[in-house]
Image (spheres, helix red, strand yellow):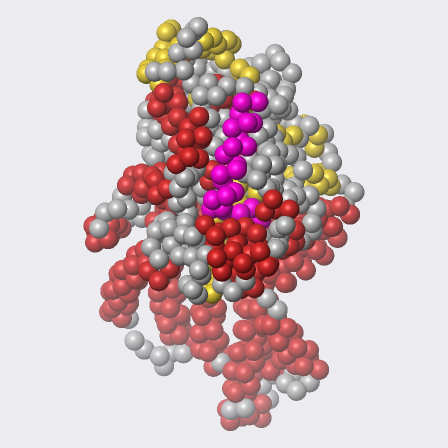
């Protein structure tokens, strides 16, 4: 099976948040738990697990016949080392803070002992939104997360083919015959993972027109995220299918610098929130309009915690007069607003140009700073004023599913200068966010989500521009191709006729 | 001659050393670094800082330069920040597609371009000349990617004669190798054919109007003898210069052709490296490319002596 798509630049899921690397890791590595289609963690590498009555000791047992791609057995020591490596990443930070010890009991069992109970422990071990817990060999997991592994031996259903690896051009996976799938029926990331094709090749086709032509000619079987202007071509070809397999779109957002004028003033930030007309932004981000949706909840559209608390700003979205009034109340005195514009990312670039014109309508003194994405990332880290090389706004996107967990999504934190760029700070919100880890049950989390969202939209550090779908085009002779709500298109269980 | 070559080789080393310093500074003066890219779009500052430290990017720039230059003098171009493999290995992996495309393009461009130029000069002012002039204007004006898309649409999608994209290594068989290179070679060659044809025509016309050509005609020399024995040899120096320049400029065109036809060559490697700020790859490819330019210039200068015995070094 040949798949035209983005390629991972780093083959280590503990080193980067790059979604291509995580996709790669889903093929090569396995996880202790897998989220089912309801986003409930189910044992994947595990045969069983149990918690002590005081919820401070969790014991895990591996299932039989798990093996690495070099044929050696997967042991509890590998799991312990992997968990310790995971602790060093933001994804494992919360569990690390609560953990007293992780140790192996025997070759197939290990135990996590907590300092105090952590209601979301199993959810954290199963999370796939940022730095998921993939199990690696002990010798690989001993490296620091910043020191990427150099051998790529996992225990997942597909083996990485080192010989055919052409960095930046293609990556080849071969079916691992030694993989023993679970007996349960496949259910998203849970249940049986059965490799039904001998080989999968991911190829980077930098030019979308060529990728489209290759799909039409049958030289590739799948094309991830084709550009919107090619949708009519795909839909008119009887051999092709265009489908939203990921079941999770990309939520575009703008982020304001809360440390510098004018957006250090809450009224100025609220003015931007009221100004945004998502339909208008979506029409420049995804002009085909196919599958576009408005995002009003901090927790996205498809997550279990999506809600409508404090979303009046959206009901009157695109309210120019309200935005002007708020800006006036903010005492705006003509300070320069610098929009960081990623010229090499078409959707965000178009949205940046449109944002500039919208902001000018309410009287903001806007300047676009165009660069490639790498330069934008360097500049957005600066906390200085715009006169000293700082910034005011930039546009980016997040997978919708990543808004499930406010403890791992840096975008959702409001911990000031210690947090993610933009540096919003609200102590009350942070208290609620800290509670997330200890609350158990989906209803309790939903209630907490509403409280957090109330504060988040009042503070208005960011504004959503809308959700665009991540569509996939593929040939009809490929069946069983499936994506999961957590934003992954998976290699197992699909079949090529 | 030997002294001349020796002097040129010494100057080449000086040129490459200057290029090395320039490239090293250039890539580091560009905003952004590999740590930002490695960490991912939504990584925290702490994670980025950790990776930066791991990569040695916090070391003072002179320390980084000495480390790189020292390795370079030992023939070590360093390790790719992203792929974790030696730069030389990555370049070698990508060299075959790029060289294959470049050599086939030059063979096609020179043979067809010089032939068209001679033909146009021979029939100057006539229908053939005008048709070839129109062809040259078109070939020179249409961007490679437009020609590429047209060729793909017609020959790959509509007629199913040739593959849309990709590269088949030579050790996989000459047939698949050649078939995969036909469309990119044609797309890339058109501009060079036009360029070489125009220069050849102009140069040939100048020679054909010389007195000794009239004398040769008066002595009853055949058209073949006049064109190929007398005119082409004397028109050779500017043609050779243009071919040398074309070969040197080819690297720019190769990047586009490699993108349009998805050929995993050096051009794509360096473009991706620039986007990712993979310093060792950018430096390695540019050092080797500048060395290649120097060698091409030297080869062209030496070839002059073969065409025109009056030229001595």
Span colored in magenta: A443-465
Position of residue A414 relative to residue A93, above or below, is: below
Instruction: Answer left or right for B8 relative to A244.
Output: left
Q: Which residue occupies the extreme front position in the image?
A: A329
Name the one closer to the observer, B306 or B81.
B81
Can see residue B185?
A: no
Position of residue A429 relative to residue A119, above or below, is: below
User: Which residue is rendered at x = 28% and y = 41% of the image?
Assistant: B53
Does the segment drawn in magenta span residue A77? no
Q: Quadrant of the C terminus of chain A?
A: top right
Can see residue A315?
A: yes
Instruction: Answer left or right for A235 relative to A349.
Output: right
- Count of numbered labels shown in the rendering: 0
Question: Which quadrant of the structure image shows residue A355?
Answer: bottom right
| Residue B23 picture location, percent across and down | 32, 59
Name the one closer to the observer, B72 or A189.
A189
Name the one closer to the observer, A46 or A11.
A46
User: Which residue is rendered at x = 48% and y = 21% of the image?
Assistant: A439
Q: Quadrant of the N terminus of chain A?
A: top right
Name the one closer to the observer, B30 or A352.
A352
User: Which residue is rendered at x = 39% and y = 36% of the image?
Assistant: A427
| Residue B18 picture location, percent across and down | 27, 63
Question: Which quadrant of the structure image shows residue A115?
Answer: top left
| Residue A130 picture location, percent across and down | 47, 32
User: Which residue is rendered at x = 59% and y = 47% of the image?
Assistant: A313
Position of residue A479 relative to residue B49, above or below, is: above
Does the segment drawn in magenta span residue A457? yes
| Residue A200 picture location, percent across and down | 58, 32
Position of residue A416 relative to residue B266, above or below, is: above
Q: Principal SS element in the magenta part? A: helix
């Amino acid at each position: 099976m040949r798949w035209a798509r983005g390629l991972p630049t780093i083959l280590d899921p503990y080193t980067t948040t790059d979604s291509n690397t995580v996709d790669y890791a889903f093929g090569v590595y396995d996880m202790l738990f897998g989220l089912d289609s309801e986003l409930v963690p189910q044992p994947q590498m595990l045969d069983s697990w149990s918690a002590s009555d005081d919820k401070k000791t969790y014991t895990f047992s591996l299932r039989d016949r798990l093996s690495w791609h070099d044929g050696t057995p997967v042991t509890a020591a590998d799991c312990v080392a992997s968990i310790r490596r995971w602790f060093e990443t933001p994804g494992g930070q919360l569990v690390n803070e609560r953990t007293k010890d992780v140790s192996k009991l025997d070759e197939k069992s290990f135990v996590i002992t907590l300092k105090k109970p952590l209601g979301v422990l199993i959810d954290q071990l199963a999370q796939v939104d940022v730095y998921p817990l993939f199990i690696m060999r002990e010798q690989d997991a001993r490296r620091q997360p910043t020191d990427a592994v150099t051998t790529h031996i996992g225990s997942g259903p597909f083996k990485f083919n080192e010989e055919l690896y052409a960095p930046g051009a293609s990556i080849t996976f071969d079916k691992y015959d030694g993989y023993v799938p679970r007996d349960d029926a496949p259910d998203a990331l849970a249940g049986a993972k059965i490799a039904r094709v001998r080989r999968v090749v991911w190829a980077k086709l930098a030019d979308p027109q060529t990728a489209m032509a290759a799909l039409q000619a049958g030289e590739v079987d799948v094309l991830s995220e084709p550009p919107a202007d090619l949708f009519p071509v795909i839909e008119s070809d009887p051999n092709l299918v265009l489908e939203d397999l990921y079941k999770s779109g990309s939520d575009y957002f703008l982020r304001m610098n809360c440390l510098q004028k004018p957006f250090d003033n809450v009224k100025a930030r609220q003015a931007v929130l009221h100004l945004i007309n998502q339909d208008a932004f979506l029409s420049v981000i995804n002009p085909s309009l196919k599958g576009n949706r408005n995002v009003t909840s901090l927790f996205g559209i498809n997550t279990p915690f999506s809600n409508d608390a404090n979303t009046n700003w959206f009901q009157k979205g695109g309210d120019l007069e309200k935005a002007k009034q708020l800006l006036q109340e903010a005492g705006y005195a003509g300070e320069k607003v610098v929009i960081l514009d990623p010229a090499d990312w078409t959707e965000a670039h178009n949205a940046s140009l449109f944002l500039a014109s919208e902001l000018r309508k309410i009287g903001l003194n806007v300047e676009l700073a165009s660069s490639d994405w790498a330069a934008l990332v360097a500049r957005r880290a600066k906390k200085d004023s715009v006169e000293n090389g700082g910034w005011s706004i930039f546009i980016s996107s997040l997978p919708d599913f990543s808004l499930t967990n406010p403890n791992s999504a840096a975008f959702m934190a409001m911990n000031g200068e210690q947090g993610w760029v933009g540096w919003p700070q609200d102590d009350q919100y942070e208290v609620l966010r800290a509670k997330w880890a200890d609350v158990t049950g989906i209803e309790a989390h939903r209630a907490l989500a509403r409280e957090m969202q109330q504060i988040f939209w009042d503070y208005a550090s960011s504004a959503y521009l809308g959700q665009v779908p991540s569509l996939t085009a593929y040939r009809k002779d490929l069946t069983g191709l499936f994506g999961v709500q957590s934003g992954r298109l998976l290699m197992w269980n699909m079949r090529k006729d | 001659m030997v002294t001349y070559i020796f002097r040129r080789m010494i100057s080449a080393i000086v040129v490459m050393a200057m290029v090395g310093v320039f490239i090293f500074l250039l890539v580091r003066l560009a905003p952004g670094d590999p740590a930002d890219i490695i960490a991912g779009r939504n990584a925290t500052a702490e994670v980025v800082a950790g990776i930066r430290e791991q990569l040695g990017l916090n070391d003072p720039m002179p320390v980084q330069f000495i480390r790189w230059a020292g390795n370079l003098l030992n023939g070590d171009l360093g390790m790719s920040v992203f792929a974790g493999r030696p730069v030389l290995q990555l370049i070698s992996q990508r060299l075959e597609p790029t060289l294959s495309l470049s050599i086939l393009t030059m063979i096609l461009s020179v043979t067809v371009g010089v032939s068209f130029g001679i033909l146009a000069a021979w029939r100057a002012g006539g229908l053939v000349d005008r048709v070839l002039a129109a062809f040259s204007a078109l070939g020179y004006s249409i961007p490679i990617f437009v020609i590429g898309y047209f060729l793909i649409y017609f020959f790959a999608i509509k007629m199913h004669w040739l593959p849309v994209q990709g590269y088949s290594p030579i050790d996989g068989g000459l047939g698949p190798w050649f078939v995969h290179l036909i469309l990119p070679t044609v797309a890339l060659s058109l501009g060079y054919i036009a360029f070489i044809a125009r220069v050849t025509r102009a140069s040939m016309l100048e020679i054909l109007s010389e007195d000794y050509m009239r004398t040769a005609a008066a002595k009853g020399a055949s058209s073949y003898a006049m064109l190929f024995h007398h005119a082409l040899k004397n028109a050779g120096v500017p043609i050779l210069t243009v071919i040398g320049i074309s070969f040197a400029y080819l690297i720019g065109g190769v990047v586009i052709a490699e993108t349009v036809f998805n050929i995993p060559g050096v051009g794509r490697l360096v473009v991706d490296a620039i986007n990712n700020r993979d310093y060792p790859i950018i430096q390695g490819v540019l050092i080797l490319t500048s060395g290649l330019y120097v060698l091409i210039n030297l080869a062209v200068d030496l070839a002059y002596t073969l065409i025109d015995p009056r030229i001595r070094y």
